[in-house]
Amino acid sequence: MNATAKMVDVQGLTVDFKGPKGPIRAVDGVDLDLRRGETVALLGESGSGKSVTLRSLMRLHPSSAKIGGKVEVDGRDVLKMGSRELAGLRGPVVSMIFQDPGLAFDPVYRIGDQIVEAVRRHEKLSKAEARKRALELFERVRIPSPDKRLDNYPHEMSGGMRQRAMIALALVCRPKVLLADEPTTALDATVQIQVLLLLRELQRELGLAVVFVTHDIGVAVEVADRIAVMYAGRIVEMGPCRDVIRDPRHPYTQGLLLSRASHAPTPGARLAAIPGAPPDLSDLPPGCAFRPRCGHAIDDCAEAAPPAADVGPAHFARCIRTRRAAEAFESVTA
Amino acid sequence: MIIGAPTPPPGGFPRDRGGPGQPLLSVKGLVKHFGVKKGFLTKAGPIVRAVDGVDFDVVKGETLGIVGESGCGKSTTARLVMQIIAPDAGDILFDGERVGSQALSLNGFRKQVQMVFQDSYASLNPRLTVEDTIAFGPKVHGASGRAATTRAHDLLHRVGLEPARFAGRYPHELSGGQRQRVNIARALALDPRLLILDEAVSALDKSVEAQVLNLLLDLKDEFGLTYMFISHDLNVVRFMSNRVMVMYLGKVAEFGPSEALFETPKHPYTGALLASMPSMDPDARTETAPLTGDPPNPINPPPGCRFNPRCAKSAALCGHKEPTLLDAGVDHRAACWLVDPASGHPRIAA
Ligand SMILES: Nc1ncnc2c1ncn2[C@@H]1O[C@H](COP(=O)(O)OP(=O)(O)O)[C@@H](O)[C@H]1O
Ligand SMILES: Nc1ncnc2c1ncn2[C@@H]1O[C@H](COP(=O)(O)OP(=O)(O)O)[C@@H](O)[C@H]1O
Ligand SMILES: [Mg+2]
Ligand SMILES: [Mg+2]
């Protein structure tokens, strides 16, 4: 296999839904590519289009959704696939884990049986062989006393354990791409870090390409090689993790970093909060969607959606004020 | 004098009785066990020791942060203080008076303590407008409709919601951040002295969370409030709190001034909680998880120190002898043998 081949290649992705107040464009021109063994974090607030972007890679949208652009996974055109090809994609090529493992497991069957069943759906194995494979998977995700745990019902496992079991289920068909939609958001920080370390380890060992959706910058820093910051359906900044965190060039990314409680100058001082609220997708302002909340906005920002401006190696920001923003950020953090 | 405690505004805090030296809230020996019913026809099941002997004070004008993994008893402690549930044992004193005594009736206490929860939607009556929601409490306590509405509009303005735009709206017409502002306004309507914030900002988007934290700080100054601030986000607790209480399995593991507790944690559990926070440095990511497994539940707490089965510094002593809260610095206590030089814990340098 070509190690530099793109595992994921998305260009100009758009996703339109019928919203209660008229049509909404949940994803508006997203470009994203991933190589084998690479992790990209999609970082953004709720409603920014992270999950919709992720689900597009497996085409998991309701049929009423309109998807445009190009989505290739492992060299295959996902948007042109029929249902048979999609079935061959979901599992063996791409699989997904999410925040609530309750969605992955049926509460009335033992977890082990559900994994055995998933194994046998994709490989011609006897029950005993499939059980052996399920056991290996449980060991791989470091579930203690794995043999005993396979006989648990979902409710008999703690949150962190269920999350590990869901990861095992996602690995059943040896996928090449793992999509993770806030898999640690509901967990205690003490458990979250265990799951993040596990994902990092699996990713290295199995050479997975991982798209990791999160709203937590710290989580993105723990897992990602690159970070893509989403706002109102667009990737407003993307670059190597280090550069996005240390030298953010989009005013929204800067705002997220500066408003963190851990960044407060002294306890009790006020946080540098971003004013306003995330926008209503059915009523977006023209031009840059962040303009109404942006301290650097000028009239030109209303003209058109800003193009990607290169601000460093493999690092871009969709902002026409990146220079001004960079100067301002330096003066605050210096 | 407690380190980090704010100086009272000129004229003292409103309705102050015992003076600044007397804690606003004093909790002593608080216990709450829940009996878990196993199910149909089965005998009474195990006992959940949700809160199992907790003592703490809340100083007038301070923010006391409360942290700990889920299930450690934070919300139960808050509900006990609020008198939403009755304790099995323990005393709650408010400005020196025992709650429910002649000097301080339950009703008199309830007016002075309010709570804001994580779920901004479930805490609001979907059929009441924002204005009626906020005016409800004052009306029940005898305010005229007119006075209550005026007050509601004042408060809406104070929490950053223009009354002209928002007074007539219903909860479902608001964003999560706006609903939480309404909950805060409603909590302030009876002019309380103590506000308990139980994960009140945890469900909000980060940009909105920062705004609401700033609002809470402003309101605290303006209304001379005292906060109990419960959150699983240690960064937020550190930012908001003067002092912090760390709970583990229904007990207090550590209690101290925010700076000292975060800079030099004395309990290994506090250290592990801090080390579990994601790193913000791409060149210094976390390499090993500070704790393994999920937080245990308080049904069969282990003998000795409750944390000892998960503690990297556990010694034989910790498995059979339970440490009480021991002095660990100025206004700083930790329930760990390591802070007691005479305990014989092998890790204490001779
Ligand atoms: N199946 C759907 N039908 C209609 N609207 C949807 C659907 N799925 C998502 N949306 C909308 O698309 C927008 C982006 O959603 P999402 O990608 O889930 O955001 P997030 O960044 O929080 O994951 C939201 O406004 C959401 O309401
Ligand atoms: N009404 C109840 N009945 C039985 N158990 C309860 C009840 N309320 C809380 N608990 C249990 O008490 C423990 C402490 O819960 P809680 O105070 O909500 O923790 P926290 O807020 O720290 O997450 C948990 O094990 C929880 O399951
Ligand atoms: Mg989502
Ligand atoms: Mg709670």
Image (cartoon, rainbow, N blue to C red):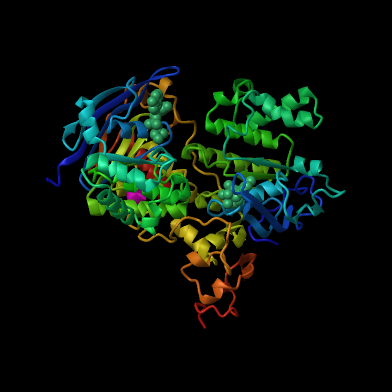
Given the current orientation, which residue lies at the most extreme right position?
B102
- Residue B310 image offset from top left, x and y in percent: 48, 64
Q: Characterize the magenta stretch by its predominant secondary structure.
A: helix
The one nearer the camera, A144 or A292, is: A144
Q: Is residue B295 above or below residue A181?
A: below
Q: Is residue B76 above or below residue A25?
A: below
- Residue B333 image offset from top left, x and y in percent: 62, 66
Q: Does the magenta run of residues contain B137?
A: no
Given the current orientation, which residue lies at the most extreme left position?
A2
- Residue A19 image offset from top left, x and y in percent: 42, 20
- Residue A85 image offset from top left, x and y in percent: 20, 30
Given the current orientation, which residue lies at the most extreme bottom position?
B350
Residue A95 in view, yes or no: yes
Q: What residue do we see at 26% from left, 23% from top?
A: A68
Image-based side of A43 in relation to A178, left or right = right
Residue A312 picture quarter: top left
Residue B151 picture quarter: top right
Q: How many marks?
A: 0
Q: Is residue A185 above or below residue B133?
A: below
Given the current orientation, which residue lies at the most extreme front position?
B41
The one nearer the camera, A320 or B223, is: B223
Magenta-highlighted residues: A219-223
Image-based side of B245 in relation to A283, left or right = right
Residue A268 in view, yes or no: no
Q: What residue do we see at 70% from left, 55% from top?
A: B59
Image quarter for ligand 1: top left
